[in-house]
Image: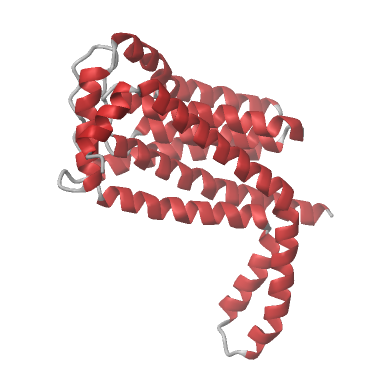
């Protein structure tokens, strides 16, 4: 069985191949999830409603609190997109907690972090570092904040006041909460011995990773909701490619540990999924009112 040191040496010496494999895997999973929702979303929703309708008469006979019956009605009305988003948010929160529990230096993930950072410091070339120094700027607040402002202004120009407010609150709130999490965990950054990137402050979770996930993820959601179906998969693929490249650039530049990026992804996924669940519930309610 390959040791941790051997595994991290393999990753560091075959960096492009490993990153390509990770990117392709993430894109494939994104495509499968999205295609599955498009193809099976309506049948699953119908099946869920049918199952609830069968169970509901039996549940009414039980001496359950009124809140439980209210939950049954809410689940029946939410729809598969909202339920999947809620499930993703809960799973991501659990994942974040598990990652946070494993970042100590005496844990397996903590040892992998240190070993990978050491291996990258020996094997990452200046050419590779230069490329990832460019990619990492796509997740920097100096880029994401102006991008977020442009999106908000565009939404206001289109008189989408509600979406503009939600966009501003979700993106700014995600950044502030990430900063609070950094202060809570107080994890020191790894040492880096190059001048291609600079970073200060605490390390966990990665702000670039969570910021990219939140901004590009929510932007992709808005683009998908307001664009023809033929653009949905390309939009999701571009967003996922940006998220993967920004996150792993932080590891390759050695300004974050691997688990910092995983934690940033988990936090970003939970945050985005929660907001999407709320927006989808709002859209369904508006549609029901207009109908």
Residue 90 higher or lower than 184, as above or below: below
In the image, taking residue 254 as reference, residue 143 lies left or right, namely right
Q: How is the image coloured?
A: secondary structure
Q: Position of residue 180 (x, y in %)?
A: 31, 42
In the image, taking residue 189 as reference, residue 61 lies left or right, namely right
In the image, taking residue 237 as reference, residue 207 lies left or right, namely left
**Which residue is depicted at the point 43% across and 39% down?**
174
Is residue 159 visible in the rendered image? The answer is no
**Which residue is depicted at the point 41% across and 44% down?**
266
**Which residue is depicted at the point 75% across and 31% down?**
230
Question: Of all residues shown, which one is farthest toward the right?
Answer: 291
Q: Quadrant of residue 192?
A: top left
Residue toward you, 93 or 167: 93
Is residue 104 visible in the rendered image? The answer is yes
In the image, taking residue 27 as reference, residue 250 lies left or right, namely left
Q: Position of residue 154 (x, y in %)?
A: 64, 24
Q: Position of residue 96 (x, y in %)?
A: 36, 49
Q: Quadrant of residue 234?
A: top right
Q: Position of residue 143 (x, y in %)?
A: 45, 20
Residue 119 higher or lower than 131, as above or below: below
Residue 136 higher or lower than 280, as above or below: above
């Amino acid at each position: 069985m390959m040791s941790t040191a051997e595994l991290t040496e393999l990753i560091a010496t075959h960096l492009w191949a490993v990153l390509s494999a990770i990117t392709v895997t993430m894109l494939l999973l994104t495509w499968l999830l999205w295609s599955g929702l498009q193809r099976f979303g309506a049948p699953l929703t119908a099946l869920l409603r049918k199952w609830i309708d069968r169970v509901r008469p039996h549940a009414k006979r039980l001496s359950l609190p009124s809140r439980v019956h209210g939950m049954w009605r809410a689940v029946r009305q939410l729809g598969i997109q909202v339920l999947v988003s809620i499930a993703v948010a809960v799973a991501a929160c659990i994942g974040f907690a598990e990652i946070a529990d494993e970042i100590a230096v005496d844990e397996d993930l903590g040892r992998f972090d240190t070993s990978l950072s050491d291996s990258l410091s020996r094997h990452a070339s200046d050419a590779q570092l230069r490329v990832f120094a460019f990619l990492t700027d796509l997740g920097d607040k100096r880029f994401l904040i102006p991008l977020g402002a442009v999106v908000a202004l565009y939404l206001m120009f289109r008189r989408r006041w509600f979406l503009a407010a939600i966009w501003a609150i979700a993106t700014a709130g995600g950044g502030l909460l990430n900063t609070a999490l950094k202060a809570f965990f107080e994890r020191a950054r790894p040492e880096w011995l190059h001048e291609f990137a600079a970073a200060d402050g605490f390390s966990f979770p990665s702000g670039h990773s969570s910021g990219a996930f939140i901004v590009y993820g929510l932007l992709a959601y808005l683009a998908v909701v307001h664009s023809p179906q033929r653009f949905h998969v390309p939009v999701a693929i571009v967003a996922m490619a940006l998220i993967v490249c920004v996150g792993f650039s932080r590891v390759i530049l050695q300004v974050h540990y691997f688990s910092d990026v995983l934690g940033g992804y988990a936090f970003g996924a939970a945050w985005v999924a929660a907001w999407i669940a709320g927006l989808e519930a709002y859209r369904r309610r508006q549609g029901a009112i207009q109908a």
